[in-house]
Every structure is written in C-alpha cells, then in structure tokens.
Amino acid sequence: MANAASPEERRSGYTYLSEETRRLQDDDFANPGMLWVEKGQELWRQAAGPAARSCQSCHGEAHDSMRSVATRYPAYSAAVGHVINLEQQINRCRVYRLKAREFSYESEDLLALTAFISHQAKGLTVHAGVDGSAADSFARGRAFFYQRRGQLNLSCANCHEQHAGSRLHGETISQGQVNGFPIYRELWQTMGSTHRMFAWCNEAVRAEPYPPGSQEYVDLELYERWRGRGLLVETPAVRR
Amino acid sequence: MANSRVKVPASAKAGDNLEIRAMIMHPMENGYNVDTQGTTIPVHIITDFVCTYDGAEVVHIQLQPGLSANPYFSFYLTASKSGPVDFTWTDQDGTITTNSATLLVT
C-alpha cells in the first residue's frame, strides 16, 4: 500500500525548508515559536478556577511529567468515549480539574500551552496508538486523507503523498507531516495548530473547511501522527 | 504588557563586544490585512524600541508598518562597566513593555 512508507521515506517538513528558515527554527532565541512556549510556561504555573490551582499543582514540573505526553496524542479517552487531541485534553483538565473556563480553540493561550507541552517532547519520536479503541477514529482519519474534496477535487494524498518533493508554484510540496506542531508559520505571522493547517489546506483546494476542534480533524490528526511515526517532535517548528 | 525575551551575556570583560538580542510578541498589523468579514484590520504596531546600558541610550529603533510580526533585533554592545541593560518597546497606543538584564563586567 502506498501509505506504508518506510521510515527513511518519511521526511519532516523541516527537510523541505530553505537553509535560512531551518536556521531560524534551530535558533532557540530567534525562533518566534519560543515566545508561545514561554507564554505556555507561565500559563502552566498560573492558578485558575475557584480553587486557584494550576497545571503544575497536579502535574508538577512539566519537564518531567510532560516529557513524552505530546508524542502519544491524539489518544482515546475513556472518559469522553472517543479520540481527543492534546488541545482538547488541556481543556478537559481546565474544566474538570481546575473548574476554570476552557480556552477557545486556536486562542493564543491554548496554542501557547499546547506548544509548551509539545516542546517538552522535542527530540522524541512520534508514536500515536491506532489500535483497539482508537481504530475507528484512525480508519476515519485515513479515509479523510484519501477522500477527494473541494472544487479542485484533490485529496490530501494527491499532493502530500503522490507529489511530495515536487514544485507547486514557488513552493516545494512537503509530505504534510505534523511532527512540528503547533508551528510558527511565516505566512500567518503567528502560531497555528494542526487544525488551522488542515482548514487552510482544505480551503486551498476550495473545500469547505471543518471547524477547528471537530472530530473530523481530530481523526485526521491521529492518522497524520501515525503516518509520521518515528519522526522527531520539533515543536515549535517554523514553516513557510 | 506583551511577552518579550532578551538575551544579554551574564558577565563579560571590559572592552568585549557582546551580542544583545531582543524579541517581542506583537502582531505588527500593517493596515492592509482584512479579517474574515472583509473588514480592514487597523494598523497596530510598535513604534519605538530603546535599549539603555547603565542608564545611557545605546540603541533606538523607530519601527514602521512594513515590519513583520514579533520583531527581533540583534546588535552589539561594548562592555565597559557593570550595570543594568534595559529594554523598552513602545506601542502606538502608548503601552510600554519593558525587560531588563544585568551585565557584570569583570
């Protein structure tokens, strides 16, 4: 099957970047994504809700407790009954543990906290679980990836699998891996989540995007994680 | 106050040329972007960046709408004596963001 790419065929979006952009990502100071990581660190320690508790109250130092967490999301949550991603898990913690208001999807705060937690896993390999309770979600995600959509009638696979490495106008088409998310995207001049990227791609093929945080995109995110299994977490990555 | 980061070496010898780095989280809206409803997003920028070393101004940059978001500056400073290195960003609406580091000259 075409999607059973061997590890050496899997390439992070980093390898498609120009040298200047790669240097920007590698420089821990100049990388603008680190602004969000630092903000996320503040939020991690900041008390919220009636009991004035923070993420740190339960989880302690993120450096230890969150070291590998981002590598295994999206994951099946028995409490919710379906697969959820890291953003949704953060919001569940906020609502059920801290009794605080949840962050809206794609808000600066949620991006910052997601980036901070994902950054703890930097350098570890991505390995999302796709068996057992996550199998249905995974199957839907895979179907989404191969489903043609939009006025241009293109599936994700048409570009990111069949034409990865080819040129589209001035750009090189990447494999569409998500190992660096949330990313600082130069086009957006800000941080963006996987779902914002999916929506952007869907709009690019003139398809109606799904809302960020929708189950369709969580399923796709799970499939994407599996597709990039073995790649290293790069958060916060810089992309064009 | 916006989120900012600065990098100043903790200590140096007198006469050393030190790289100073400063960055702030800011959208730097140039006035040409539109939101999802087609409404123009007004200009929202930082207008001034100032760095002082032991109270004396060493760098003053005036920013214009053409700059990209999260402006990042890097420059060199000659170490002379121990003292604070202060950074100030002034927003167009007058909001001031400050950050500071202490340089120890031996």
Image (spheres, coloured by chain):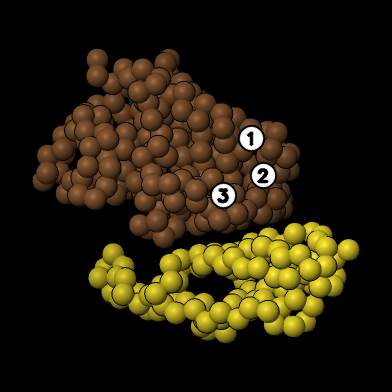
Give the distance between the C-alpha atoms of the residues marked 3 and 1, in whole angstroms: 23 Å
In the figure, is residue A143 to the left or right of A220? left
**Are callouts 3 and 1 both on one chain?**
yes
Residue A175 falls in image quadrant: top left
Residue, disc 3 = A27
Q: Secondary structure at mark 2?
A: helix
Figure chain in yellow:
B
- Label 2 is placed on what type of residue? Cys
Q: Nearer the viewer, mark 3 or mark 1?
A: 3
Pair 2/3: label in front? 3
Indicate the amino acid at tag 1. Answer: Met
Q: Position of residue A231 (x, y in %)?
A: 46, 28
Q: Which of marks 3 and 2 precedes in the sequence?
A: 3
- Callouts 2 and 3 in the same chain: yes
Q: Are marks 2 and 3 in contact (CB under 8 Å)?
A: no
* Relative height, residue B77 to residue A96 (above, below): below
Image coords of residue B80 (percent x, y): 81, 73
Question: Is B10 in front, or is B15?
Answer: B15
Which quarter of the figure is the N terminus of chain A placed in? top left
Colour seen for chain A: brown
Q: CA distance from mark 2 to mark 3?
A: 28 Å
Residue A187 location, quadrant: bottom left
> Which residue corresponds to the image point at 46% horizontal and 46% vertical from the top-left?
A22
Q: Earlier in the sequence, mark 3 or mark 1?
A: 3
Q: Is residue A64 visible?
A: yes
Percent of width and height locating residue B81: 84, 72
- Mark 2 sits on what residue? A55
